[in-house]
Image (cartoon, rainbow, N blue to C red):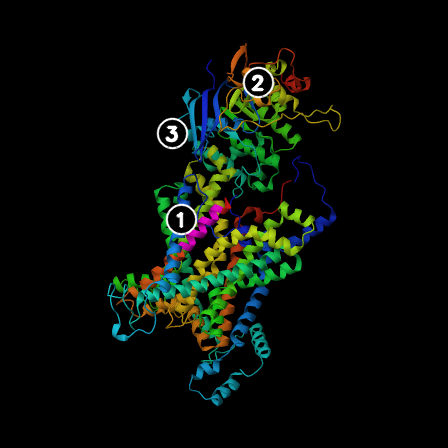
Amino acid sequence: MSSLGAQIHVGPLERARDRLARLGGPPALRFAGRRLLTAIPVLWGVTLLTFIAMNSLPGDAAQELLGANATPAEVHQLELKLGLDKPFIDRYWHWFTGILHGSFGHSLASGQSVIGILGADLPITLELIAYSLVVSLVLAIPLALVCARWPNRVADKLSLGVSMVGLSIANYVLALILVYLFAVKLNVLPAIGWTPPGQSVGGNLKSLTLPALSIGLPLFCFYTRLLRADLLEHMQSEEYVVTARAKGAGPWRVLIRHALRNSVFGLITIVALNLGALLGATVIIEDIFGLPGMGHELLSAINTRDVPVVEGAVLIFAVMVVAANFLADLLYSLLDPRIRYGGSAG
Amino acid sequence: MAVQPAEIAAGTVPVELTAPAAGGGRLLRSGGLALSLALLVVIFGACFIWPLVGSVPRPTGGSVLNANLSIGAPGHLLGTDPVGNDELSRLLYGGRASLEVALAVNALGIVLGGLLGALAAYVGGVLDAVIMRFLDMLIAFPSLVLALAIAEGLGPGEVHTIWALAFFSVPAFARVARAETLKVRERPFVAAAQLAGSRRWRILGAHIAPNILPQLITFAFLGMGITVVLEGALSFLGLGIPAPAPSWGNMIAQGQSVLSAQPRFVLLPSAALCLAVIAFNMLGDALRARWAG
Amino acid sequence: MSALLTVRELRIDFLAAARVVRAVDGLSYELQAGRTLAVVGESGSGKTVSARAVMGLLPSSARVSGSIRFEDTELVGLPEERWRRYRGAGIAMVFQDPARSLNPTLRIGPQITEVIRLHERLPRAEAAQRAIELMEMVRLPAARERFQQYPHQLSGGMRQRVMIAIALAGRPRLLIADEATTALDVTTQAQIMELLRDLQRELGMAMIMISHDLGLAAGFSDEVLVMYAGRGVERASTQTLFSRLRMPYTRALLEAIPRLENPPHARLAAVPGQPPDLAAGFRGCPFAARCPRAQGDCWENTPELIEHEPGHRWACWHPLGLEGSAEPELLAGRGQRA
């Protein structure tokens, strides 16, 4: 970086390295791509861990399927049929190579292809996740702005107090309370069940509203506090905020055009980091509301020790987490000009 | 300094629940500390001490003849459940079970996770990289899912639940310990101790540990809230602590079936759960504000 | 002719956790249109705080009393909406740290046009054109390309030029440069100072130059105000101040400047001690503890800033006699001006 405006002598080694780096694509993509590469061992490790957890512990699918009354001989016969007698390494290898060929195997319980089962479940879970994210973020941003505009006044203190309570409520507890209020008492929303969008778009949204609120509202409280804190931090300590005020900009302009633009990065990162928790929530929420999504599928597969289904679901969950983090990195690197237009002065 | 995403990812910025005080916040914060401490004393006292010293009936083995007594019935302050157990007693014993799990999980976290993270950060190099890759793997994944698998594999029971949940608290604490150790490692008194020839374990124990402990404890309080909720989820789903032994989670699950007729079986353990989590969150928050600023 | 800016008995207190810190204590000065006033002092002397008060940029914990008159309008106590009409348009400021004073997520161009569009109803294209003209005026090479770039793609010197362009965009009558060159290397510092001086002449602006660097003050200002512990302790035209040193403090500051002709490893003549704790309040002259000439009455009575000689005010019970005189090279820069 030359403040004198003179040319800096760049040696041939630096130029070659630079050219090589540029082959990877624009800085944004390279940044996100690096993170993606490190995710692959994570994915593999997770599936291995799950396999170990499901397989090396007492009890197995055959026993579960046949129930407590089955004779050992019947259980053994089913084990042979399902290939459960083979050693652990063999089974994992078999499953792993199957994955690489695009096959997730078949359900031990029903015989259906795992991809088929999960493929039908996935859209429901995705819709629930999307709906929950919307609930958690859409109102959080304006509310955080209002709190940051008049910090420590009545509205701010009130929202801090309410949000502290709100984020402390477990999502399954909130689910039951919402069911009691809106389904039982007021009878405006369904307590159980999922209506496909093909049948009725309104019905579809209604059937997902209470579940999305259960997951989204505590997160909304959390994100509001987070964004508010970040906004205030910027407003109080960043020099460019003073510059903006010195230009004659009003408080909203400073807050939105200057503070918020810089605060979104922290928010994006936290939302991405929280995605694991969001996915975990779908398991219990789908169970409460009887939604036939992946979380529900996973739960029953765990109960019946249907290993291929569990593995498939776990892998898909893991891929979703990785994909979400990748998207967040990509978004972050696209939005932050320091990464997008890397490079320095001269 | 504004919260940088890199810091969040590295775990050096724990969950921000309040803003830095702009003048008048200090009074509220010390009030928050006092209030949350008081609340926790009440909760722990009720769940751990009251059953021992007071005349609280047993939480299990009730007679169906006593079923569904309403709140305020003689001898049953909060009534009885559909099989005749005293509801208050179930709340207290259930709380004790849930809190025991949370305490154990977070204690394991501080000790094992703290050690692991501090060691990784202090030693650095390959050991650090390997440990952190492994921990990243565990943290990245939805913990409830794997906890379910492990709990299912192990079977229900308080101890098994502790193991299942510790699987995730240890990596989380390790990450915090690592981030804090990295900061402390650069401080002059550590260099001074190294120059004086102190051995590695002594430095870790005498210099590093006391300086990362406040952050770990703050994290532990927030972690208590999270663990209590997770244990509740496990018990709710039939794993975790098995009926008839009460836990707030399985009480909520049992109450679900009679939600419309008698909401109190869901509302009472829910309120207890939420109150505990609020208290932990407020305390963790207040401690962080106090120890960070 | 009435002055462009008149400050009278300006007092600024900060309320901080049950303490009151008096950052500025009875400051008074005037500034005519087109002239440059250098405000010099150590950190904590109140120079930046008083400048921010002129812009109305103090935090809410500040309590301002006294008078700041700008073009016949009293600024102290002005409602916020009216303040905003002055900021950026009547009075503008250039800040110290160009690395942090620009929004990293906005392009350069919009950060300049923002000022223009806040105060005038110009369509975007015209505002952009004016911004590019401004960038050329501040001698920023390749202005059209820079318009689209982000702050991190510019060097420190270039960013400071952008800050100056931003400050000039509203055509201010008064420009406040708050340590505008402190964060830059020496060569760039000189370039920026010359730029400011030329622009000031071209545009007929008045300028307040805040610095701890007496050399800079000597080279580029018409008048100098020395501040210490929140008070004005000496004020005179630059020529007068440096040719007839009166204040021991000012001389100490001068002597603290390292000189090329000193032998290697010569001790730097720092001013010993620390400025007084502004929350504690003090009695007598605030500089007494560090003054080599301090005598009995210096500890008892606080000296006021009085015009002891025509055009030269100082606040001291035992000023230097006629023997103190500035080094010639400090005035060399002024020689070029005349």
Tags 1 and 3 both on a single chain: no
Marks 1,2: beta carbons within 8 A: no
Pinpoint residue A150: horizontal percent, then vertical percent. Answer: 38, 40
Q: Quadrant of the C terminus of chain A?
A: top right
Look at mark 1 in the image and give the residue it sits on: B34
Residue C141 visible, this orientation: no
Helix, strand or loop at label 2? It is loop
**Residue C79, label in figure:** 3
How far is mark 1 from mark 2, CA to CA? 59 Å
Question: Which chain contains the residue that carries disc 2?
Answer: C
**Residue depth check, mark 1 versus mark 3: number of the one nearer the observer:** 1
Toward which corner of the image does residue C120 lie, by quadrant? top left
Marks 2,3: beta carbons within 8 A: no
**Residue C222, label in figure:** 2
Residue under the image location 36 percent in, 51 percent down: A162
- Please, what is the three-letter code of the amino acid marked with disc 2? Asp
Residue C111 visible, this orientation: yes
Q: What segment is highlighted magenta in the picture?
A: B278-290
Relative to the observer, which residue lies in front, A242 or B230?
B230
Question: Which chain contains the residue that carries disc 3?
Answer: C
**Residue depth check, mark 1 versus mark 2: number of the one nearer the observer:** 1
